[in-house]
Amino acid sequence: MREEDGTIAGWYGSGTDIHDRREAMEALERSERRFRTLIEGMPQLVWRAVDGGQWTWCSRQWTSFTGQTEVDSRGRGWLAMLHPDDWQAALAAWEHAQGDGLLAFEARIFRRAQGRYRHFQTRALPVRNEAGQVTEWLGTSTDIDDLHRLQAQQGVLVAELQHRTRNILAVVQAVTSRTLKGSSSFEEFSESIGHRLAALARVQGLLSRRDSSTRVPFDTLIREELSAHIDLDENGDGEHVTLRGPPGVPLRSSLVQTLALALHELATNAVKYGALSQQGGHLRVEWELRGEDEAHKRLFIDWRETGVPERAEKETCLPGGGYGRELIEKALPYQLGAPTSYELTPDGVHCTIDIAVPSDSQLEKIQ
Amino acid sequence: MSGLLLRGRRILVAEDEYLLADDLKEVLELANAEVLGPVASLEDAAAFLGSGTIDAALLDVNLGGEPVFSLADKLLQQSVPFAFVTGYDRSALPPRFERVPRLEKPADGAKVVKTLQALLG
């Protein structure tokens, strides 16, 4: 306070305690930092918008995912990063959002690093003022592309399972009717069909044990089939059996079943009438890879029975009314262009099968 | 089954499983149809296309690992009626084949003949 001449007469002062305010501001800053860290650390793309989907801000995730700058994303700029086919759905969702008090839609968003679109689920809730009016929207877009892919894959697998189940039933029906035709008594039918279904079951086991990227190797198939009839040692040899050939030669899945059924008929025949039915008989199965060209390798299988001199009249063909021969001489060539031969030599059965080996570059798709 | 059912009709059979193809052939021949094929691949089926020799066709959906749809499209273009013989569900087939009859495996012989009769009018 001053005198009339302007000299200072005294001081008044007032103090305001700003301690609390300061504390509150610091707390707010800390809270904002935490909030920002939270937003920037989450995997979702986060953004703010005002009514009608006019963006006012987006998080770093959006800019680094799409390559679009924050400024460019504002307003309806974000729409440019969505798949054009999804624009309509996105805009329609915004139209409904106001009334629903919730924004929710799915759309594909472009990922710059991959150069392709990925499926996203987008959700936002409105922020309201004290009067209950919407002041802005806070939204997130979540990457659900892997989920989409897995769902699609699952759909394919279920369809495939249905297809295979019905197909195998049709094969069982065909095998049954052929076995019926080739049987002269119920006992004969009962025995043959039991063994044939068991052979089918074995091959289904082989096919389902492998994972989708691997194939059934020939040596596994021949051992599995012969083991059902006779004892084999670790090398795959038995008292009257010699198996010789490279391990791991892959078979096309569509061939495995028919080849297994054919080998089953050969083995059954050998056990009943051929090399495995008598002393002095011997079965030698040899196989080798042929062909110069890596992409066109062929597996040549040679099944030779020896020491089977006398064969009675009724034993001159495979059992089952020629069903076995039908598989070898017709089914294998038909299904896979596999040249085959079947011959009764004075010494026993001699059969050859020549099949294409799938090269690595032709790894199968899910069929 | 009357012998007149499919008399002289030329039916293309595309089925890669030999036993099933052979069964279909037998059913059709019993109905006095003339069987084209059977064929186990798209490549072999192509030989019968465009020559105007096919009256109708039975198609397995999967031929040696290849979907049969390209062949089905060609038949549609040439106005050759056909049916799918398949283990696949209707939902696994493209919508453009919505009106194509689907025979479930294992296919019943009488039903196969009846379906073909309906297709051939």
Image: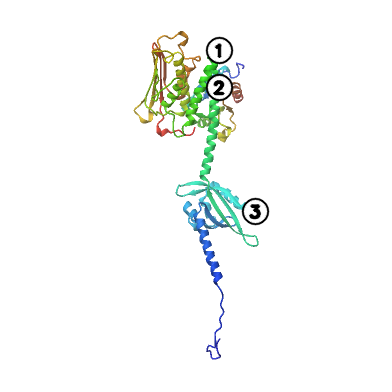
Count numbered badges in the picture: 3
In front of the other: label 3 or label 1?
A: 1
* Nearest to the observer: residue B28 or residue A211: A211
Give the secondary structure at mark 1: loop
The mark found on residue B57 in the picture is: none
A105 sits to left or right of B45: right
Q: Do tags 3 and 1 sit on the same chain?
A: yes
Q: A346 or A239: nearer the eye?
A: A239
Depth check, front residue: A226 or A289: A226
Residue at (43% x, 27% y) in the render: A220
Residues packed near mark 1 inside 10 Å, few (<14), some (14 to 19) or many (20 plus): few
Residue on which the image places disc 2: A173
**Residue A341 position within the rendered picture, expressed as x and y whole percent measured from the top left:** 41, 17
Residue at 46 percent across and 11 percent down: it is: A315
> Mark number for residue A99?
3
Q: Nearer the viewer, mark 2 or mark 1?
A: 1
Asked if A60 appears above or below B58 in the picture, the reply is below
Q: Give the colouring mode of the picture.
A: rainbow
Sequence order check: which comes first, mark 3 or mark 1? 3
